[in-house]
Image (cartoon, rainbow, N blue to C red):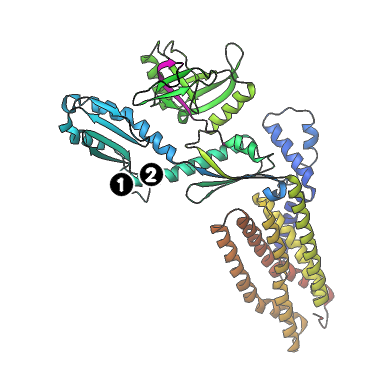
Amino acid sequence: MLQIDSWKRVLIWLTVVVGMVLALPNGFYTRVETHNDAVKALEDGGAAPGLEDQVALWPSWLPSGLVNLGLDLRGGAHLLAEVKVEDVYKARIKSMWPEIRDMLREERATIGTIRLQPSAEDMLKIKISKAEQVQEAAGLVRGLSRPVVSLTGAGASDIEVSVDGDQVVVQLSEAEKVATDDRTVRQALEIIRNRIDEVGTREPTIQRQGAKRILIQVPGIGSAGELKRIIGTTAQLTFQPVVTRTTDETTRVGAGEELLPDRNDKDVFYVLESAPVVTGEDLVDAQPSFDQNGLPAVTFRFDPSGARRFGDYTAENIGNPFAIVLDGKVVSAPTIQSHIPGGSGIITGRFTLEESTELAVLLRAGALPAGLTFEEERTIGPELGADSIEAGKIACIVAFVGVLIFMFLSYGTFGLFANIALIVNVGLIFGLLSLIGATLTLPGIAGIVLTIGMAVDANVLVFERIREELKTAKGPARAIDLGYEKALSAIIDANITTFITAVILYAVGSGPVRGFSITLGIGILTSVFTAIFVTRLIVVMWFERRRPKTLEV
């Protein structure tokens, strides 16, 4: 019979109330956003005047989650960057030389002396004085190889060692290059996310596109140039032994050495050993501070492994200069005065306060493993976003009003019930979007407009089925009961196929496509809930109150 248990009624109305309360903050968007920013500032230790007043703009006992506005609605910056993975090949090969050199020197009695020869940047060529022992030397180097850490390169070695006359040639294997590409892009993705999060930007979109590209969209930021400044600095920090200091930029360097300029004095250059003792990857913390003269500087601290290497090197090289290199320029080259065992130190180099703060942020977020090439950049002004919001708002209102009028004219009182469920449906969509912290884009608005049109489909199926049952001379209660029962399978089937489409769009799509699929998928779930449960409950409550002898559907 036409009845719903009391506990089910309570559960349905409780779900509706919770959804509407979660959606409520979006009706006071600017006020709640100001409140949230002030709360975060206080949690971070902010003490600016007026923060308490801003917090009071919204009651703390109410939800304060908002549907975040995407790039096309808020305005901001869009970048498409390609990771230069070839940089990593060069760094990997360069870092192998000290280990290979030390190992071959121990076998000097067998293979003779060794000398690093000029070669391409992604390979090592090592000349063996006893040419007849070159195969023996190659075998020793092969012993340093390691398995490739990836599913596709299982069983392969990370280096390829070959012989060319009296030279041993070392380079990365193809399997290792493929694995390195994947690791490098993943690492760059995470570091870019860390850097953007450090500056406190709201709801950025940072995702991989293809094999080597990264899409970066940050709403609310001033320009693409500002975004590039945040993420475009590689901030690769190394500590390298100094061979000599010179003022001649044409100074020839030997194999395993490089000539780098001084960061502050364009006329000074340093010849350094290419292989660093420690790198920025060994850092666990970096903070802006001041040196003993009161000038801006950056203090740093290494992890245990980096601290041990740093301490061992300073103990063995007291009196020798030691270069601190940032992005290919020597920041400073102090002389080691004593053993530094703690793994901490300070970087000075005539920084401004802003530069030292920015450098600390970059070092703390991590060094990009490779450089970035920006292939596409756009700045979207907030005015365009405001226009998009206004256009989306008009589209939603027109669709909403049109559906409400159509349903009332077509089904009378029952159409009015469907309209109430439709209003609840839209509230539930925004409540769920706020709950999961989703970002609403212009395609997302299109998904909501489409959902408004589709939301009444289930009610149309039910109402038409009730009409059919009334024609067979069944009573009103039985007609309503059979109408919902027999239309249920059609409602489920129709919505499942659309929901599967939304899931596929989310899985294989990106950016705007995902925004559309999220609102469409959530809209389908709320539409089924309101059609099967909310509308039915309203009809049952109306029928229990009126007890009509006939129905006008």
Q: What residue sits 48% from the left and 24% below the top?
A: 325
Q: Marks 1 and 2, how far apart in space? A: 11 Å
Q: What residue sits 37% from the left and 51% below the top?
A: 152
In this rendering, does residue 112 appear at all?
yes
Name the image quarter holding the C terminus. Answer: bottom right
- From the viewer's perspective, is 240 left or right of 461? left
What residue range appears in magenta?
Answer: 232-248
State whether residue 250 is above or below residue 200.
above
In this rendering, does residue 70 appear at all?
no
Q: Is residue 234 magenta?
A: yes
Q: What residue sits 50% from the left and 28% below the top?
A: 327
In this rendering, the count of numbered labels is 2
Depth check: give the residue in front, 423 or 391. Answer: 391
Q: Residues within 10 Å of mark 1 (few under 14, many from 20)?
A: some
Mark earlier in primary sequence (1, 2): 1
SS at badge 1: loop
| Residue wearing tag 1 | 156
Q: Is residue 4 magenta?
A: no
SS at badge 2: helix
Residue, far front: 250
Quarter where residue 42 is shown? top right
Residue 387 % position (x, y): 77, 52
Quarter where residue 411 is shown? bottom right
Label placed on residue 177:
2
